[in-house]
Each structure stands twice: as C-alpha cells, then as structure tokens.
Amino acid sequence: MSTDLAPLPNRLPLIRGHYAAATFHAFAKAFGMIVLATVIGCVLFFLLLPTLIVIPMSLSETDYIQFPPSGLSLKWYRAYFSDPDWMAATWFSLKIALATTATATIMGTMAALAIVRGRLPFSSALQALALGPMIVPHIVLGVALYLVFSPLQLTGNFFGFLIAHTVLATPYVMITVTAALQRFDPALELAALNCGANRLQAFVLVVLPNIAPGVAAGAVFAFLASFDEATVAFFISDIGGKSIGRKMFEDIDFNLTPVIAAVSTVLVVVSLMLMGAIHLANAQKRG
Amino acid sequence: MSGPCEVPQPAFPRQRRSTAASARFYSRGVSVCLAAPLVVALAIGFVYPVTRLVGLSFEGGSLEQHRRLVAEPLYLGVLASTVKVAFIVTIASLLLGFPVAYLMARLRHGIAMVVAACVFIPLWTSVLVRSYAWVVLLQRNGIVNTLLADAGITDGPLKLIYTQGAVIVAMTHVLMPFMILPIYSTLQTLPPDYNRAARNLGAGAFRAFISVTLPLSLPGVFAGSVLCFVLALGFYITPALVGGPGSMLMATLIGQQTTVLLDWPFAAALSTVLLTVTLIFVFLFRKTLSLSKGLHSVH
C-alpha cells in the first residue's frame, strides 16, 4: 500500500516482483510472529511457573514433594499454624513489618517533602545516601549491622530489626512520595494559605489528600520490603528472635518439608493482595 | 529557583512575590527538621555500620586481610566468577526480557494486562519463595528430573541443583522483572508512528525495529541492565540456597566466612571489595541508573 506513494522509478521493480514478494512477506511475517509468540510464551511460563508451583505443592497429602501432588489436604497449613516456632517467627516479622511501615512512611514522606518542597542544604547528597541501602549489597549491610548490633544485644531484637528495616524500606517511600509531590501543584497549597490556613492545616487538608496515593503505595512497598526481607534478617536474627525469612531459609536449607510450600503460599497471597490493591487503586484513579 | 507561579498578580508584586516564593518552599529550618529523622536513622543503621565494617578490614592499619585476598587465587577466582555470573544473568535477562517488554508496550490493553501480570506476580513474590521453588524444581528427585525421566529423555536423575547453571537460571528468573520494567516504560513512551513512518519509507519490519525502535529503547535497556548487574553482584539468598560449593560467589563466600568460619576481619575485607566493585559500577553508570523507573511503572 505504501508503495503507491513512492516515486515512479522506485515503483517499477516493486510492481514487477509484487506478488512473489507479497507471498514471501506474508510467510516471513507469519513465521516471525509464530517464533516470537513461542519465545514470549516460554519466557512468561518461565516467569510465572516457579511462583505458582508452590500452591499445588502446599496442598499435597504426601510427606515428600511430589508433582503433580496426589490427593488434596490442608494438613501442611494446619502444621504451619500449629507449630509454635513458625508462629513465633510469623508474629515477630509481622510486628516488625507493621512498625517499619509506620516509621519508614513517616520518615520517608518528611524527607521527600524536604527534598522536593524545602530548601535543604546537600539535598542531592541526602537523596543519594537515602537510596544507598537499595544499591549496597544486602549481604554487606547484613554483616555490618550484625557487627554493630551484636555487642549491643540488638540481634534477634525488635528494635534492631526496626532500625535495619526502616533504613531498607525508606527508599521505596521516598521514591513514590517524591513522584507524587512532583505531580502536585504547589499553587493549591498557596491558595489554601491565602484563604487563611496555616502551614499545618494546608498540609493536612490540601497537600496530604493529594499525595495520599503515593504515600499509600510507599507504605505497601515498605511493609513488603520488611516482611519479605531475608538477607539482612538472616544476619541479625538469633535463637531468641527469628524473622519468618530466617526461619524459611533454615528450613529450605535443612529440612525441605511441604510446610514451607504452605508458608510460601501464604506469603504469595499476602503480597499479591497488597500489591493488587495498590495497582487497582491506581488504575481506578487514572480512570 | 522559583518557577512560574500561578497566583494572580498582586498589586505589590515585589512584596508579594517574596511571600509566594517562601510559600512554595519550606524554610531552611523546617526543611532540616523534616529531613533530620531520616538522617539520624541512616547514620545509625547504614553509614556507621558500613564504615565500621570497612574499618575492620583495615584493622590495626594493616593491609593484611586485603593482601590475603589478593594472594590467594581462589578468592580472586570467586570475584571473577561473581562478575561473570552477574554479566550472564544480565545478558540472559535482556535477551529474554526485551521481547516481553516489547509485547507489553505494543499489545491491546486487555492482553497487555495479562502479560504484565506474568511480570508483576514474580516481582511481588518473596525472593525466598522463588528460590524455594527452584530448589524443588531442580533437586535430585525434583519436578524437572521426574518429568525428564518420565518422558524417557534421561535414564537417571541429572545433577541440576547446587551447580552454577542452577544459580544462573534462578537468578535470571528473580532479576528479569527489573530488566523488563525499565525497557517497558521507555518503549511505552515511543509513539507507534515512528515505526509506521519507517515502514512507510520502505523499511521491513526487521529493519524498522533495528534502526528505529531499538536505538530509541536504549535508555531503558541501559537502565535495566545496570540495575540487573548491580543487584546480581550482591545477591545472597538465591545462590546460597540453589548454588553449591563449586559455584561460590562473593556474597556466599562472605556468608561462609561469617557463619561457618567466623573469620570476621577477612569477611570485612571481602565485603569491602564487593562494596567497592558495586560502587565503582554504580558511579560509572549513575546517569543511566534510574532506581525509580522500575517502581514508577507500577503506577
């Protein structure tokens, strides 16, 4: 079709070989599409399979891992919920994750406000430093924190975890809140100030509702960054206080039972529900 | 610093402008107070511990630990194989991830959502869960070996797990979303008209892709590659669970020194080297590394 627009000298050879070329092109195109679709299908299968395979495994009736599982049972979930070790690790991680969500969301939002809307000396240095925990290998951070926490008896300790996970989770809040603040028009806040609101009222009544989706997304990321975190948790856990990540790591390494599949399924469901909620909320907001 | 202001021009522009500017930006004192809690947390939970660790590797002002690291070919070999594995994982993620990102950006909304779900679901799943799944898939009596034997392809179980191949496969799986998302967000901003224009000018589909779409997607490709490589350099959980003694990486070597051999000064030296390599790489590619890109595309 496009050849119709080409100048005449260019069109002549094209017209001559038109039919042969068209058939060849149709074949080549169909073949290319099939190859591409197969490759992409395989990649998607590769991406999804290991995530979802834990679900059928957790419902297995046998004591060893078998695929496809024979028989359906919830006994591994019962085993998980009745095992005091697993429950202790789960509650410990849940408490840490909730506290981390609060500290990281508040501190991250405050810092993002200072960076985007404030006059802060060394603003870009602070930004780079705050994103540092995302870049520095977590093994290095884990070993470093163990070294400092161990003599202070902060290993296996709620406050030790809270410090470590706040540092790890805050970058996520800063990224989402900074983006939300950059989309927010400061003129709206000026209008509120002009109408007689003070700084705090303007922030609570005008700025906060506008950046709330970014803050909420940051809070969800912060919760998962703490709850799913395993490397630093591996080093700063001890016998007295073990996170669910450390407990899982030990069990995968030493006794591979289907209980881990049940725990994994619970973790996958929690993550997907939280992230799905954020995703849907954002999709709805955009209409 | 103050940009265009949308407040109606007041009668006394000079005086009011200064009010407007100070209303746009918080004062220095307020800004410092807002940033202070984070600065304190970073000092306690990040800067001080990492400095202490680096300091420990130079204990007593000696280079003893670092000399040990350089003198023993084994350790330099681990460093080399860490860089090699990170490189292979990055290239594999790029080759496998690019078509997926391309499809996500070009498909109609409904199908693109399904493809996006396939990328996001693993990204949102704990690294531990995914590493566990690979252990189950690849172990001696695992799913892959069972399927291969049932299909009559292999006679006995293959040694799949605790090999470098297993580490590369599992790490590629974990890191590929970090490659796909930056490429996707770059491709998404490309108007399809560019490709159409190239086709109109006589380029075939392949030629149009090579000379128009691919060069324009390079910022995303670089951002994804740098992110993947940096994350792969310091990966611990996956190689620790899926790899074996023959596939030691820097992170697993540090783990072994601290948890088994309890040689803290040497672990500190290894950590310092890993940290330095990572930071040099981040510094070299700081322009292309956009941490927010992967997260932004979530919105």
Image: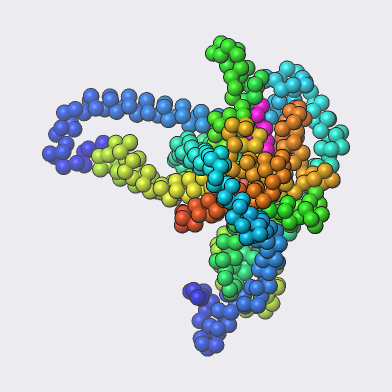
As drawn, A80 above or below B196: above
Q: Which residue is drawn at 68% across and 72% down?
A: B33
Q: Which residue is drawn at 51% across and 45% down?
A: B229
Q: Does the stretch in magenta take in B254?
A: no
Quarter placement of the N terminus of chain A: top left
Q: In which quarter of the image is residue A34?
A: top left
Residue A283: percent from the left, percent from the top? 59, 48
| Viewer can see residue A234 | yes
Per the rendered image, the range of residues in magenta is B128-136
Q: Residue at x 16, y 36 (%)?
A: A11
Near-viewer residue (A84 or A174): A84
| Viewer can see residue B173 | no
Near-viewer residue (A170 or B245): B245
**Which residue extends farthest left?**
A9
Near-viewer residue (A18 or A224): A224
Secondary structure mostly seen in the magenta stretch: helix
Residue B159: percent from the left, percent from the top? 59, 22
Residue B70: percent from the left, percent from the top? 54, 47
Q: Quadrant of residue A33?
A: top left
Residue B53: percent from the left, percent from the top? 66, 55
